[in-house]
Amino acid sequence: MDKLITLYHGSEKIVEQPMFGEGRKNNDYGLGFYCTASEDLAKEWAVSSMRDGFSNRYTLDTELLNILNLNSPDYTILNWIAVLVEHRLFSIKNPVARRAKRYLIDNFGVNVNAFDLIIGYRADDSYFDYAESFLNNGISVEQLAQAMRLGKLGEQIVIKSKFAFPKLKYKGYDIAEKDRYYVLRKARDDEANQVYLKMLEEESDGLYIQDIMRGGIKNDDPRIPRNISE
């Protein structure tokens, strides 16, 4: 990663001065300012079917930042899931899922608050469905990894720490036109949803969350897929 990077934040409003401590606790990685290195993705995230949005542009000096890259080979797909289940609100449909949530956090959790910057995938609707289905013992970890690799996921960059926020410099904005970018956003989600529905119809001999718990499988087990990015 270059020391000085350009980031985009898709929003329904212009955000000239992001503030530490604002936002929703139940985002993918908790409180933080959520951005992407892709202007097109930011524009997709900014629009709805009813309105245009804004792609806010910033530069960030990363030289002194402590960076967590969940998409690197240092982490497994279950590290990403564990962070997600700790912060997002999941539908717990059975006792297995309740135990699974605690097992994932205890054995695969990562303290994202110890870092200044987080790089990882964004759990859009369909990808959140994948994670929820895995938690409820509906798909295997191999199917989960396959879906992540096949899907056109959006990688996000999250500014987390009070130390990092002053290094974010506002550089302007572009308008995200709903007539163009909502279509792209919907097509991305529809494609992911089709992959998900097809997956539910397939049987898998792989590891389900119940197998992982029963076997006491930990983060160093070679059967757990690493590096979910291509």
Image: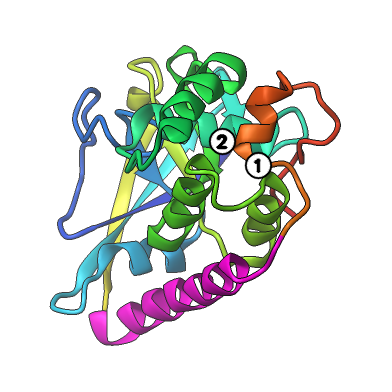
- Residues rendered magenta in the picture: 178-203
In x, y percent, where is residue 181? 35, 78
- The image quarter in which residue 91 lies: top left
Instruction: Give the prevailing secondary structure in the magenta stretch.
Output: helix
N-terminal-most mark, 1 or 2: 2
Is residue 65 or residue 193 the one in the foreground?
193
| Label total for image | 2
Q: Is residue 74 above or below residue 48?
A: above
Q: Which mark is residue 195?
A: none
Q: Amino acid at mark 2?
A: Trp
Q: Quadrant of the C terminus?
A: bottom right
Residue at 78% across, 52% down: 205
Q: Residue at x 52, y 72 (%)?
A: 197
Q: Amino acid at mark 1?
A: Tyr
- Residue closest to the far right: 222
Packing grade of label 1 (10 A; few <14, some 14-19, many >=20) is: many
Residue 1 visible in the snapshot: no
* Occupied quadrant, residue 225: top right
Task: Reply yes or no: does residue 183 show up in magenta.
Answer: yes
Q: Residue at x 39, y 25 (%)?
A: 160
Instruction: From the image, tell me which residue sits under label 1.
Output: 208
Local crowd at mark 2 within 10 Å, few (<14), some, or many (≥20)?
many
User: For this view, does 98 lie left or right of residue 154?
Assistant: left
Q: Residue at x 17, y 60 (%)?
A: 12
Q: Where residue 131 appears, x then y in whole percent?
A: 50, 47
Q: Is residue 202 magenta?
A: yes
Instruction: Label 1, secondary structure: give it.
Output: loop
Depth check: give the residue in front, 164 or 200.
200
Quadrant, the N terminus: top right
Q: Nearer the viewer, residue 184 or 39?
A: 184
Circle 2 residue: 80
- Residue 97 visible, this orientation: yes
